[in-house]
Image (cartoon, rainbow, N blue to C red):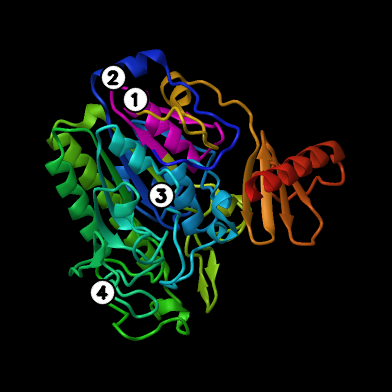
Amino acid sequence: MKITFLTTLAVVSCLSGLLQATEQSQPNIVFILADDLGYGDISCYGSAVNRTPHLDRLAAGGVRFTDFHSNGPMCSPTRAAFLTGLYQSRFGRRFESALSGSRRDPGLPLSAVTIAEVLQQAGYATGMFGKWHLGYEAPWLPTNQGFDQFRGLVSGDGDHHTQIDRSGNQDWWNGKSVSMEKGYTAELITRHSIDFIERHKDEPFFLYVPHLAIHFPWQGPDDLPHRKRGISYHKDKWGIIPDRSNVRPHVTAMIESLDRSAGRIVATLDRLGLTNNTLVVFTSDNGGYLDYAGGFENISDMGQLRGEKGTIYEGGHRVPAIFSWPGTIKPSVCHETTMTFDLFPTFVTLAGADNDSATLDGIDLGEILFGGAKAAERFLFWRMGSSKAVRKGSWKLCVRGDRPPELYDLATDVGERNNLADSRPGVLSNLSNALAEWELDVER
């Protein structure tokens, strides 16, 4: 196993009874990751506009988290943290934002141990179908990071019908080379995911389904293609469809295509008799857009939350999260504060994988999921550029460049409207010191 970056938190043990069960039959793991989905964009999180019956059913039969967070307010950071179980900042500041589109820039270091590699070594078939965004060319591709099979895009966005990225390049890969296919991106991802399940139904598998939806260009299944090969869209708002006054129907169509995709994957598990031995997790890589330059408005719904994608306020990183495992996970609503990088140790423990040498920033959620336990209070951190935040319990400190610090009690002010920095100097000092120590740690 490759050596990873060191930190102080180790994997917490899952319930002994669950470990015994997984030793007898390793569970399948399906992780579905939406792109730019806002906290209130699906019905079970409050949307009155978007119809998401399949995700609602998944939530009703599993655990729906209300205080789950992406590791970053943009695409690449959360993906790096999920795959490694570490703060993305440990790989350098450029992983705190979306990676550039330059094919000469290195991606996620090959020295990093990924969840796919750990599960692969534990006997799992590993497949990824969808958006990578952690490297644009070899060797920084999924098949060099533990995935047996990869079909999808390597860039941060592509036309959902032509699979052309914002630089005008063809961006639909099969393993280590471009191999274009015709079809709507969400439907292609779903088809390949179902095929992977069918081919590996008789062995444990890890299926990673990082959708491109609902990232711009905002195009539903019935919308027209927009981008063409050889044309750069960097000066054209990256190829966003030109219907600026009526974006919501396009976004709704994308969200509902996500829901249908999840429904088809779950239906495949049901049809093959795999449901009771499969953990399905659904979440988003960051919050959605409220408004976008050029006149687009009300793209996503963040409910009561302040901020949007790209900000360190709750709207930038508090996201929907659903865990479903019929017969093993009891239906409930969980209010514990959790984060994307917690999935790495959780999946490792469930698989009974050998991970003794790894030290992670994330924690195993097993006792929360299967025993209803409370999560131990811990400091959680976000950083992007000069904006950074730290959270412990209900207290959250936000720092934006040289502006005065902002302190919020999320227990009474989830919308982050009432700055308590002046009235709670002790809390402010405690969080400020923790943030400074964390920055020193990750910079090492």
Of the numbered discs in the image, which one, if any, rests on residue 352? 1
Mark 4 residue type? Thr
What residue sits 28% from the left and 75% below the top? 170
Mark 2 residue type? Glu
Asked whether the beta carbons under mark 2 and mark 4 sit within 8 Å of each other, the answer is no
Q: Which residue is mark 3?
A: 42
Dot 1 or dot 3: first in sequence order is: 3
What residue sits 28% from the left and 47% below the top? 262
Of the numbered discs in the image, which one, if any, rests on residue 23? 2
Query: Which residues make up the magenta segment?
Result: 322-351
Q: Residue 408, can we see it?
A: no
- How many residues crowd mark 1 within 10 Å: few (<14), some (14–19), many (20+)? some
Mark 3 to mark 2 CA distance (whole Å): 36 Å
Asked whether the beta carbons under mark 3 and mark 4 sit within 8 Å of each other, the answer is no
Tell me the quadrant of the picture where the N terminus can be found: top left
Is 259 on the left-hand or right-hand side of 67?
Answer: left
Of the numbered discs in the image, which one, if any, rests on residue 316? none
- How many residues crowd mark 3 within 10 Å: few (<14), some (14–19), many (20+)? many
Mark 2 or 4: the one toward you: 2
Dot 3 or dot 2: first in sequence order is: 2
* 149 part of magenta stretch: no
Residue 177 placement (x, y as % from top left): 24, 66
Mark 1 or 3: the one toward you: 1
| Between 195 and 57, the one nearer to me in the picture | 195
Q: Which residue is mark 4?
A: 162
Mark 3 residue type? Ile
Mark 2 to mark 1 CA distance (whole Å): 6 Å
Dot 2 or dot 1: first in sequence order is: 2
What residue sits 32% from the left and 72% below the top? 159
Is 365 on the left-hand or right-hand side of 279?
Answer: right
Mark 1 to mark 3 CA distance (whole Å): 33 Å
